[in-house]
Image (cartoon, coloured by chain):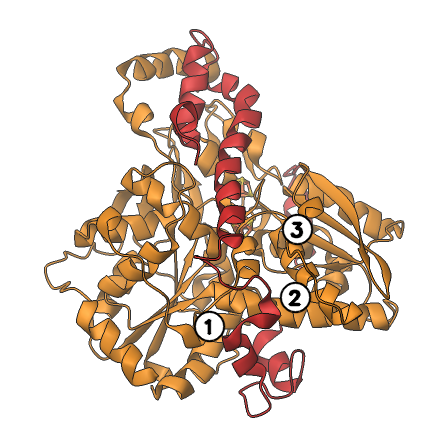
Chain colours: A red, B orange
Amino acid sequence: MKKGRWDLSRRSFIKVAGLSCGYALVGARMARESVAAVLDLVGLRQQSVYGADANPKIYALRKSQENPMVKKLYAKDGFLAEGPCGHHSHTLLHTHYKDKSMFIKALKKKGIELAM
Amino acid sequence: MSEAIKKKSAIQSMDLSGVQVDASGAVRKMEGVKNTIFAPGVNDLGNLYFLEVDHTLCQGCGECAHHCPTGAIQETEDGTRSIVDPAACMNCGQCLTHCPYGAVTERVSYVSEVFEKLKDPDTVVVTMTAPAVRYALGECFGMPMGTYVGGKVHSVLRRLGFDYIWDNEWTADVTIMEEGTELLERVTQGGKGDKPLPQFTSCCPGWIKFCESFYPDLIPHLSTCRSPVAMLGPLAKTYGAEQTGKDPKKIYTVSIMPCIAKKYEGLRPEMNASGQRDIDATINTRELAYMIKKAGIPFTSLPDEEPDPILGMSTGAATLFGTSGGVMEAALRFAYEAISGKTLVDPSIKAVRTGKGINKVEVEVPGFGPVRIAVVSGLQNAAKLCEEVRAGTSNLHFIEVMTCPGGCVNGGGQPMDDSILEASLFKKMMARVNKRFTLRKVA
Ligand code: SF4
Ligand code: SF4
């Protein structure tokens, strides 16, 4: 884990960037330019995710299909014996979606402008 | 197995009787973010705001609007900002995490209800923790950005008195089995009929609401798989109840998320596959930190522990769900072997990890040819791919979408350190100056 100057979180970083960018008549607006740097901070968390995945002391296995408790779930005498996407899976683990565009249309009708 | 688990949690949980539970309606600062104690039910979903701008704190800088994917957060008469309508808001919380003044607040917090359930000896309270939480919670306790604290998360939850430490990483692995199999079905059928290609991932509730609101014609492209937490809820109350011998009606499921949109997902009416509400409460990383601090548990000195394996054991593929590109990589680790019948020797598929915005990659699978995939984070970027799919010009097989730039590690429920915000008098002075420049006078 890198430490030091990057050992900051987003909001502090925005403030540091904002403040060090000069006496910010536009203070927070300056933060926009630091968005790329903020993404680097998020990069630290991402790096840590990839590090854990590759660390056998944290994850002995790296493929979902090898998880013993997943195998147990789908085993012949298991809870989801039909296997993935079987009938029981479909009732418990799958879903359906609903068109919600009418709510957006209603807002637009009221004169509200959106970015989309 | 179940006996051993029961004993373990009983020994280690702490006495919460001294913890003063905040009353409903109370406003509390949780890791620098104002939050209102309020535990809505499914019937409250209609016009529910999950976020709201505090107009006394808003300085009118517009940073929130700059990060809002839908344009839902807009300028009001006096120059402050406001969310125009819950229908326009995807609940991603990017406005909140980017506000330099802490003016965007949360309106829904189940923290008190969860404390009450933990105190009630009759309720079997189980955890459903998302991958990304374990890469950020440490920051709330002074640990460096990104420190992995997975083992401590399990042990702190046990000490808080949760009866079973179940984990969304386990259902992330299950999701790969379901969603990977669904993808193979679609590919085998040539993407015809009601199962078109490309298939979109469905684990991010911000993206799901976005697709339903702005691209309803693409709904058939969405994987029908529930998200990992929306799989764990019903599995906890059926399979989990069966395995532990508990009455499903007494099981209370707590979704612990890096996210605000997951609170919305938990309340979606169809989340009742178990015959009851699948997800009883949703809290985020900041709220978990608040609970730990309130209970006075010294987080950093906790030992590392394992989750309860039956609905908790996971693989590296599962933890990748916390980052943009991760669901895709995990799915490819499965699809590669399922399609080719060969062993994927190096599970790291680095090609899907690079890139910002939109990342399109072809992965060669023996016996099939190129699998064409795209990884995208940020809904503005997702919209571009949606346009391609809508126009019929996309030749992709599978598209992963996450609302938050970089994925859930950057979710709207993750911690931010506002110590500088709080401490700097200079900043407060500047804020006043800024306010004069950016806010319009109301006549
Ligand atoms: S939560 Fe997301 S969609 Fe809603 S107003 Fe904030 S940035 Fe916009
Ligand atoms: S990317 Fe993750 S944190 Fe962000 S809205 Fe989607 S599920 Fe929530």
To the question of a shared chain for discs 3 and 2, the answer is no
Identify the image quadrant of residue B153: bottom left
Q: Say which amino acid is labelled 1.
A: Gly
Q: Report x, y in % for residue B376.
A: 68, 45
| Position of B141 relative to B423 (above/below) | below
Q: Return the disc, 1 or 3, that comes first in the chain's sequence.
A: 1
Measure how far apart labels 1 and 3 are at the Cα level: 22 Å
Foreground of the two, B44 or B98: B98
| Position of B441 relative to B193 (above/below) | above
Tell me which chain the residue with mark 3 is part of.
B
Mark 2 close to ligand 2, CB under 8 Å: no
Q: Is residue B321 visible?
A: yes
Q: Please indicate whether residue A85 sits to the left or right of residue B417 in the image.
A: right
Q: Are marks 1 and 3 in contact (CB under 8 Å)?
A: no
Foreground of the two, A67 or B93: A67
Q: Is residue B91 visible?
A: no
Tell me which chain the residue with mark 2 is part of.
A
Measure how far apart labels 2 and 1 are at the Cα level: 18 Å
Q: Which mark is residue A97?
A: 2
Identify the image quadrant of residue A96: bottom right
Q: Say which amino acid is labelled 2.
A: Tyr
The secondary structure type at the circle numbered 3 is strand
The residue indicated by pointer 3 is: B401
Name the residue: 52% across, 63% down.
B315
Q: Report x, y in % for residue B117.
A: 25, 69
Q: Report x, y in % for residue A39.
A: 55, 32
Q: Report x, y in % for residue B399.
A: 73, 54
Mark 3 close to ligand 2, CB under 8 Å: no
Q: Say which amino acid is labelled 3.
A: Val
The residue indicated by pointer 1 is: B233
Foreground of the two, B289 or B425: B289
Q: Which mark is residue B308?
A: none
